[in-house]
Image (tube, rainbow, N blue to C red):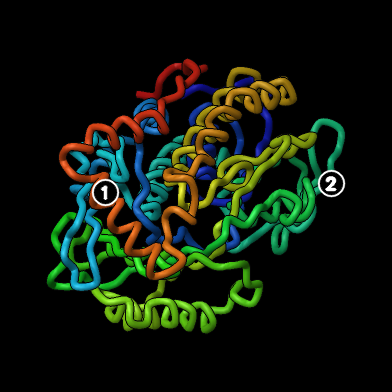
């Protein structure tokens, strides 16, 4: 365990993947860290996220793989089905060498957060006073000051910090307080996405992510770590509707409307959504920040750069960003400003790559009409046929070429 002289005191807003990963690396390096999270506890559930390329390398460097292995989701690949559940195309993980729609290593977002939190608590227990972890609180004001920032909280007493990190997601309050309103940086992508946990239907093929196209929606059922449960994944092609924000009743009504008569397991999903305790429903937006640093406030994860869940890269970029920021601060603890400049340069290519949506966007992933649905089904079946499978594999590989991860700035953790 390393202790750094003249270490800064860092405040992290958000205890998701980015916030917990950053806190873990800072505490490991002997940097005093405060984490505030508005939720009352670490949030379980969430869709499966994949680790590949640089994000997998980060997980290995951070020593997270043993915990991740215990919580891995076993997923053979993606199967496309028609209204009667008949499969017309497959994209297996093995056939695409883990570089297709499904990666070799998949883990539920909530399980990855649990792995990070458990490791953080274990490491901080060896250094009393180095970590202040506060659930049920949030930042309400940030005032830049020479060499730091003065911060007010909803419940806790005001305090001064050398650095404030916004790791609080796509609707980041930290970004709003330090950089300006969300509308300045958010671009709607033409749809909404929802997912939640439901009991696994008896006729679902084990270990396969099944997906169906229908006019205005694409929906699927994805495996969980527990075979008795699965995740319903729904994507809707539609214009922005401010009335849906935070209105659970309106969200459920939209799901029922869009899946009416859609066949396959649409009725199963509609019946389950009302009792789901982990429903996620949000607009698909891209977040573009010209700069991720403003004085002594820096953004990471979806707060800094987001291509929406359609990219499948949000968690990967969050993990990479947390690792790089911690490494920069550890390498230059007595010069926070230069550390932030270095971080801003290093994370930029990963952020840009992480905003690229496979297939060209929602218009090519969700059919807008019955004719488009039939065409999409036909094209998908042809592209995933055995003769064309090598071509599709090369297309995926070209769109996700791995970026080199900067060398570690500190000694590897044993």
In the image shown, does 327 or 117 lie closer to the viewer? Answer: 327
Q: Is residue 374 above or below residue 405?
A: below
Q: Does 271 appear above or below 177?
A: below
Residue under the image location 37 percent in, 57 percent down: 47
Q: Badge 2 is on which residue?
A: 143
Figure check: 413 above or below 187: above
Give 167 or 147, whichever is nearer the viewer: 167
Q: Is residue 231 left or right of residue 189?
A: left
Viewer-side residue, 48 vs 153 = 48
Residue situated furthest right in the rendering? 146
Which residue is at the front of the view, 168 or 231?
Answer: 231
User: If the image is split into quadrants, where does the C terminus sit?
Assistant: top left
Q: Where residue 78 appears, x then y in whole percent?
A: 24, 51
Corner quadrant of residue 331: top right
Label 2, secondary structure: give it: strand
Name the image quarter holding the N terminus. Answer: top left
Horizontal and vertical percent for residue 256?
41, 82
Q: Which residue is mark 1?
A: 71
Q: Please give the name of the residue rendered at 72% of the width and 35% of the height, measured from the top-left corner.
A: 291
Identify which residue is drawn at 54% across, 82% down: 250
Q: Position of residue 356 (x, y in %)?
A: 50, 40
The reply to whether the C-beta atoms of the residues labelled 1 and 2 are less than 8 Å apart is no
Question: How crowded is the residue under tag 1: few (<14 C-alpha within 10 Å), some, or many (20+)?
Answer: some
Is residue 50 at least partly visible in the picture? yes
Figure check: 70 above or below 171: above
- Quadrant position of residue 346: top right
Q: Residues within 10 Å of mark 2 (few under 14, many from 20)?
A: some
Q: What residue appears at the point 31 percent right and 48 percent down from the top-left corner?
A: 107
Circle 1: element type: loop
């Amino acid at each position: 365990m390393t202790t750094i002289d003249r270490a800064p005191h860092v405040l992290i807003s958000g205890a998701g993947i980015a916030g917990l990963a950053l806190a873990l690396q800072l505490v490991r390096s002997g940097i005093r860290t405060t984490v505030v999270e508005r939720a009352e506890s670490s949030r379980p559930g969430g869709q499966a996220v994949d680790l590949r390329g640089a994000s997998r390398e980060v997980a290995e460097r951070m020593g997270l793989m043993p915990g991740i292995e215990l919580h891995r989701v076993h997923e053979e690949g993606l199967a496309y089905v028609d209204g009667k559940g008949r499969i017309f195309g497959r994209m297996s993980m093995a056939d695409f060498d883990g570089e297709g729609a499904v990666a070799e290593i998949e883990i539920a977002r909530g399980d990855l957060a649990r792995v990070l939190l458990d490791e953080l608590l274990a490491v901080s227990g060896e250094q009393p006073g180095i970590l202040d972890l506060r659930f049920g609180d949030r930042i309400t004001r940030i005032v830049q000051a020479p060499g730091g920032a003065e911060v007010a909280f909803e419940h806790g007493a005001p305090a001064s910090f050398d650095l404030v990190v916004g790791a609080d997601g796509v609707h980041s309050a930290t970004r709003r307080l330090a950089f300006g309103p969300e509308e300045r940086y958010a671009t709607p992508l033409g749809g909404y996405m929802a997912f939640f946990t439901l009991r696994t239907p008896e006729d679902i093929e084990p270990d396969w992510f099944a997906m169906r196209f229908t006019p205005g929606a694409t929906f699927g059922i994805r495996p969980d770590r527990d075979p008795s449960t699965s995740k319903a994944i729904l994507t809707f092609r539609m214009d922005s509707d401010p009335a849906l924000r935070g209105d659970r009743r309106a969200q459920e009504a939209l799901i029922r409307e869009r899946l009416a008569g859609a066949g396959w397991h649409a009725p199963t999903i509609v019946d389950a959504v009302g009792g789901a305790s982990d429903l996620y429903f949000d607009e698909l937006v891209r977040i573009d920040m010209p700069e991720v640093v403003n004085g002594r406030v820096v953004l990471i994860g979806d707060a800094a750069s987001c291509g929406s869940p359609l990219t499948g890269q949000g968690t990967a970029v969050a993990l990479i960003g947390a690792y790089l920021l911690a490494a920069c601060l550890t390498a230059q603890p007595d010069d926070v400003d230069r550390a932030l400049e270095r971080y801003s340069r290093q994370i930029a290519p990963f952020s840009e790559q992480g905003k690229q949506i496979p297939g060209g966007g929602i218009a090519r992933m969700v059919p807008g009409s019955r004719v488009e649905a039939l065409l999409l089904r036909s094209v998908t079946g042809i592209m995933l046929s055995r003769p064309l499978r090598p071509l599709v594999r090369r297309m995926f590989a070209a769109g996700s070429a791995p970026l080199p991860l900067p060398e570690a700035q500190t000694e590897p953790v044993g």
